[in-house]
Structure formats: structure tokens, C-alpha cells
Amino acid sequence: MTGLALYAMAAAIIGYFFVNAYTGKYGLNARVELDQEIVTLTAELARLKTERVSADKRVALLRSASVDPDMLDERARYQLNYVDPRDLVKIIGQN
């Protein structure tokens, strides 16, 4: 009877480790989820790099060495909430 109990305990322990190897935090299923997260985060990183390049270009236009007059005018109007009387303004989403 003792031998049978030892075999049963060994089988239970092996079964436990087998189940954890498949469904555990670092198991086979987790690897698939990690691969999907890697793909998602890689796409987000590419989007953010593109956004940063665009922002760097806009900032470069505002540098004191070479200020683009149109960019300066746009930012000043936005910051000061200023509209020229000759501008056409369309108000969207007025509360």
C-alpha cells in the first residue's frame, strides 16, 4: 500500500508541474500572450516615434535661429486665444 501511495504522490506532483508548465504564469499559454503584447507594443512604439519626429519638426520651426513666421503666428494665436477680424471662424461644440 505504501508503494501505491508513493506512486500516486509522484504522479500528482508530476501532474501539478505539467499543468503549471502549460497554464502557469510562465507557461506555454503565457508565451502566446507575451508574443501578442510584443506585437502591440512594437506597433505603438512605431506610432510614437513617428509622432515624436513630427513634434520635433514643429519645435524646430519655432527655434530662435530660424523662426517660421506662419508657425509663430499660429502658436501665438492659439496661446493668446486671438482671432483676426478678417479670419473666418467656425465654432464647433459650443456648450
Image: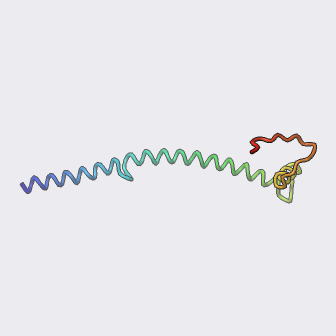
The quarter of the picture where the N terminus appears is bottom left
Would residue 51 appear left or right of 34 to someone viewing this image?
right
Would residue 34 appear left or right of 21 to someone viewing this image?
right
Question: Which x, y percent locates residue 49?
Answer: 65, 50
The quarter of the picture where the C terminus appears is top right
Of 65 and 36, nearer the camera is: 36
Point 62% across, 47% down: residue: 46
The colour scheme used here is rainbow
Question: Which x, y percent locates residue 89?
Answer: 85, 41
Q: How many marks?
A: 0
Point 38% across, 53% down: residue: 25
Q: Which residue is farthest right?
A: 86
Point 82% across, 40% down: residue: 90
Residue 33, compared with residue 62, is above or below; it is above
Of 70 and 66, nearer the camera is: 70
Residue 53, compared with residue 64, is above or below; it is above
Q: Which residue is farthest front?
A: 95
Point 41% across, 48% down: residue: 30
Would residue 92 appear left or right of 85 to someone viewing this image?
left
Question: Which x, y percent locates residue 81?
Answer: 84, 52
Question: Which x, y percent locates residue 91?
Answer: 80, 41
Q: Which residue is farthest left?
A: 1
Would residue 9 appear left or right of 63 to someone viewing this image?
left
